[in-house]
Image (cartoon, rainbow, N blue to C red):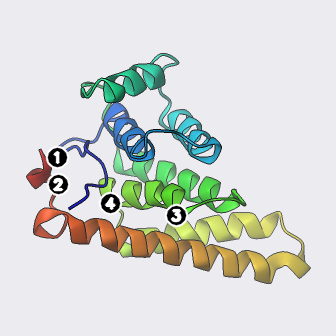
């Protein structure tokens, strides 16, 4: 079976580990599209990675290596990063399933529960509602729900291709 990412931390989640997993996903087809690059840059910013780390991660993946280290990510930071990535993906008008796969992967990696996912989606929706005129709100609401459905579907696909229902420990 096709693996989503060759880099899935099995214990502590670090900023470098999360970034490396996402970059390995976007490089599955050998290239990074403009939209994927936008998501990767956004993720690096949300994770607060030092300026040299994204290039080091990219070089390691291309060389077939795994970069170790990084700072542990708290659950609060996982939720913040996931929310930022969900919103970035949703606001990108030309997003593809591959970009939503990045968001679904982060949901899996960060162990975002269904309840937490609902909170994130509701928070993104509320924030967007503040900046959108009333006549566009229905479009925004429908779009956020469609984005959530796509991410949820991909999240379930990720779980279905991993051993033991998504147990991270079986992937090393």
* Residue at 38% from the left image edge and 26% from the top image edge: 57
Residue 5 rendering spot, x and y as whole percentages: 30, 48
The quadrant where residue 21 appears: top left
- Pointers 3 and 1 in contact (C-beta within 8 Å): no
User: Callout 2: helix, strand or loop?
Assistant: helix
Circle 3 is placed at which residue position? Answer: 97
Q: Is residue 54 above or below residue 80?
A: above
Q: Is residue 108 above or below residue 147?
A: above
Q: Whole-Å distance between the Cαs marked 4 and 2?
A: 9 Å
User: Callout 3: helix, strand or loop?
Assistant: helix
Q: Whole-Å distance between the Cαs marked 1 and 4?
A: 12 Å
The numbered dot on residue 168 is 2
Of badges 3 and 4, nearer the viewer stands 3
* Residue at 35% from the left image edge and 31% from the top image edge: 16
Query: Considering depth in this image, is 33 or 79 the residue closer to the camera?
Result: 33
- Pointers 4 and 2 in contact (C-beta within 8 Å): no
* Quarter that holds the C terminus: top left
Residue 86 rendering spot, x and y as whole percentages: 55, 59
* Quarter that holds the N terminus: bottom left
Q: Whole-Å distance between the Cαs marked 1 and 2?
A: 5 Å
In the image, is 35 to the left or to the right of 160? right
Query: Considering depth in this image, is 105 or 83 the residue closer to the camera?
Result: 105
Q: Residues within 10 Å of mark 3 (few under 14, many from 20)?
A: few
Of badges 3 and 1, nearer the viewer stands 3
User: Callout 1: helix, strand or loop?
Assistant: loop
Circle 4 is placed at which residue position? Answer: 108
Circle 1 is placed at which residue position? Answer: 10
In the image, is 56 to the left or to the right of 72? right
Mark 1 vs 4, N-terminal side: 1
Query: Considering depth in this image, is 162 or 127 the residue closer to the camera?
Result: 162
């Amino acid at each position: 079976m096709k693996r989503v990412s060759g880099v899935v931390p099995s214990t502590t989640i670090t900023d470098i580990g999360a970034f490396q997993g996402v970059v390995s996903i976007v490089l599955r087809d050998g290239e990074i599209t403009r939209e994927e690059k936008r998501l990767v840059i956004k993720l690096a910013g949300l994770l607060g990675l030092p300026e040299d780390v994204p290039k080091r991660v990219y070089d390691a993946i291309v060389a077939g290596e795994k970069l170790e280290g990084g700072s542990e990510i708290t659950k609060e930071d996982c939720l913040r990063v996931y929310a930022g990535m969900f919103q970035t993906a949703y606001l990108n008008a030309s997003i593809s399933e591959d970009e939503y796969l990045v968001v679904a992967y982060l949901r899996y990696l960060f162990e975002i529960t269904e309840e937490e996912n609902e909170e994130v989606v509701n928070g993104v929706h509320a924030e967007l509602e503040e900046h959108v005129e009333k006549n566009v709100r229905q479009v925004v609401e429908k779009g956020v729900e469609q984005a959530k459905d796509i991410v949820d579907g991909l999240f379930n696909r990720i779980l279905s291709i991993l051993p033991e229902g998504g147990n991270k420990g079986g992937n090393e």
